[in-house]
Amino acid sequence: MSYCSNCGGRLNDQGLCPNCGGMSEATVKPKQKNDSEVVECLRETIFASPLKGVEKAARTRSASVWVTFGAAFIISSAAAAFTAVTTLPPAFFGAVYGENVATAVTRSRSAASDSMIAAFAGLLGYSVVLSLLSVLAVAMIAAVLFTRAEEKPSVTQALNISTFSLLPLTLCLLIANPLSLLSVSAALSLLLFAFSVSVVMFYFGVQKASVFKKSPFWLFLIAGFGVLILLQLCSFGLQTLLF
């Protein structure tokens, strides 16, 4: 039998006190939890640390987490591509991606024409498709690691880890291109730092969501390099198709 913490009276079957109207903690707590899982993950990241945020994402089964952060990454990639295409010199794209992409950038800045529209759409499409493939690639690494786990998380948890760990890259993509107008090397350094943080968050989240007999570190490295090579091949294929 439970008792009221206010007056000491007995609580009824609904957890209410007939004397003062107080409620048991079990009755109060569910009503106080109004924040979404997305907000809770962000709160943990901001007020505690990014590792606490990804740990929260790893332990929730709400699909709203991976839908929200996956969409945010793809949108930020498209926004970054738009900024880059309209501001960075074509020579930069030639050095990084090849002459075909540099030509497409030059064409997209020419006077309004069908070729300009096609080039611009191709560049944005390339960015969106590649960012979507990146999300899937990270999820693939998670799937490979979880094959070695004794206690496997749900598919939703795996997707939550994969997308939430991309949050540093999502934010830095929005900053890197404006920064590149001042210093390309500073923008690239920022993206490299964000990538490193995302890798640490991802690995930490994987370990929090499952139990491993042996450390999956080396498997993580092998799977990561394999996926990077696969993404490079996909990038080359997209350039061939779109440009």
Image (cartoon, helix red, strand yellow):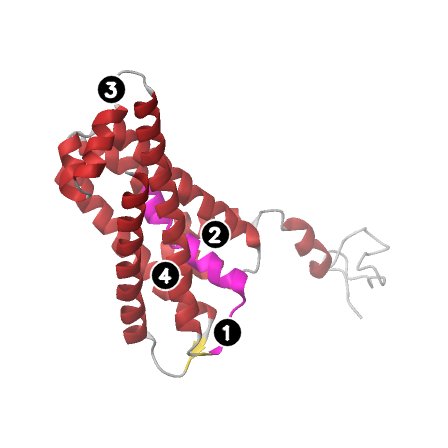
Could you say which quadrant of the image residue 190 lies in? top left
- 10 Å crowding of disc 4: few (<14), some (14-19), many (20+): many
Name the residue at 51% across, 62% down. 157
Which of marks 1 and 4 precedes in the sequence?
1
**Which span is picked out in magenta?**
150-171
- Nearer to us: label 2 or label 1: 1
Q: Residue 186, image x and y in percent?
A: 15, 40
Which of marks 4 and 2 precedes in the sequence?
2
Q: Where 182 falls versus 10 (above or below)?
A: above
Q: Nearer the viewer, residue 101 or 211?
A: 101
In the image, what residue type sits under mark 3?
Ser
Q: Where 152 falls versus 176 (above or below)?
A: below
In the image, what residue type sits under mark 2?
Cys
On the question of residue 40 being in view, the answer is no
Give the alpha-carbon distance from disc 3 to disc 1, as whole Å: 53 Å
Q: Residue 160, image x and y in percent?
A: 48, 57
Q: Mark number for residue 152?
A: 1
Which of marks 1 and 3 precedes in the sequence?
3
Indicate the quadrant containing the N terminus: top left, top right, bottom left or bottom right: bottom right
Q: Mark number for residue 202?
A: 4
